[in-house]
Amino acid sequence: MEEPHSTQTTVDLMIFDYFVCMAISRIFVAIRQGLSIEHVQWFADMVELFHRLLIHRGALESPLPWDLELKLRIFDLASLFLHWEPPKDRELDLFTPLSDIAVDFMDLCHSAIDNVSNTRWFDLGAHLMVHAMLEEDVRFPDQLRRLYNWTANDLELDAHWEMSRASVLKHMPPPHGTAGPVSREGLHETFSMDFLQEHFVEFFEDLMEGLDVPVILQLECGQLEGLTREETQRIRDQCGVF
């Protein structure tokens, strides 16, 4: 009696994997091109819908496959980054500080340490930290302090993080850095938001390339991993997929 449920769960997870990856892809496009959330809303809604469906069916009583769990964390993080903009003087009821997004980024990379470049990980973390300093220092000092003091509890990794922080803080004036007086415009030119956004997207695009391609997406592309296109087409024909 357990087999039908197991089969249903497998199918649900395949569909969920597909929607998560498609949503992530569209979020990357939106970040890179400066598009609004409406560009990704349908796929983001489908991710939320299937997530609730999996919970309802009890499919999440066991841990998700590591690969899918990481994709879901990337989706959540990229969604927060897409929504973020400098707080300035606006209302912050549902605002997530960039410092918190950056801490989530650091934690995600630490959990996927075998899949990321330490240099790129810490360099991007340092650039996120600088933008948090530029835009949120006054309103979110505690969150910024938490990011600055983030630790991997590993001497080698923490040394990498310290070097990356130092490489950007040398351009920042006190109290955060050691540079001489510099205008806010000059800092924004040195640490442009366009560069940060491109750096963010490229990092996660490369990370996603090392993860499993959803089976449904493989079928759409006409070739399942480990099979020829002809073998894949026979499976598509048998399943009624055209």
Image (cartoon, grey):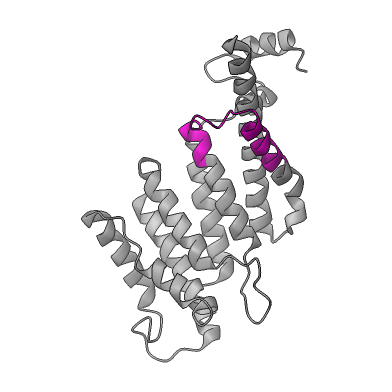
Q: Residue furthest left?
A: 155
- The correct choice, above or below, for 187 with respect to 152 in the image is below
- Left or right: where 7 falls relative to 65: right
Please say whether residue 116 is visible from this viewpoint. Answer: no
9 or 171, which lies in front?
A: 9
Find residue 148 and report its horizontal and vertical position in percent.
37, 69
Find residue 76 and report its horizontal and vertical position in percent.
58, 50
- Residue 117 highlighted magenta (yes or no): no
- Residue 56 highlighted magenta (yes or no): yes
152 or 194, which lies in front?
A: 152
At 64% from the left edge and 11% from the top edge, which residue is drawn? 230
At 47% from the left edge and 36% from the top edge, which residue is drawn? 210
The quadrant holding residue 215 is top right
Find residue 54 and report its horizontal and vertical position in percent.
63, 32
Q: Quadrant of the C terminus?
A: top right
- Left or right: where 167 falls relative to 187: left
Q: Is the magenta stretch mostly helix, strand or loop?
A: helix
Residue range (magenta)? 46-70
52 or 195, which lies in front?
A: 52
Find residue 45 and report its horizontal and vertical position in percent.
73, 44
Q: In which quarter of the image is the N terminus?
A: top right
- The correct choice, above or below, for 82 with respect to 168 in the image is above
Please say whether residue 101 is visible from this viewpoint. Answer: yes
The quadrant holding residue 232 is top right
- Left or right: where 82 falls relative to 176: right
Q: Which residue lies furthest to the bottom in this view?
A: 181
At 49% from the left edge and 79% from the top edge, which residue is drawn? 137
At 56% from the left edge and 42% from the top edge, which residue is drawn? 72
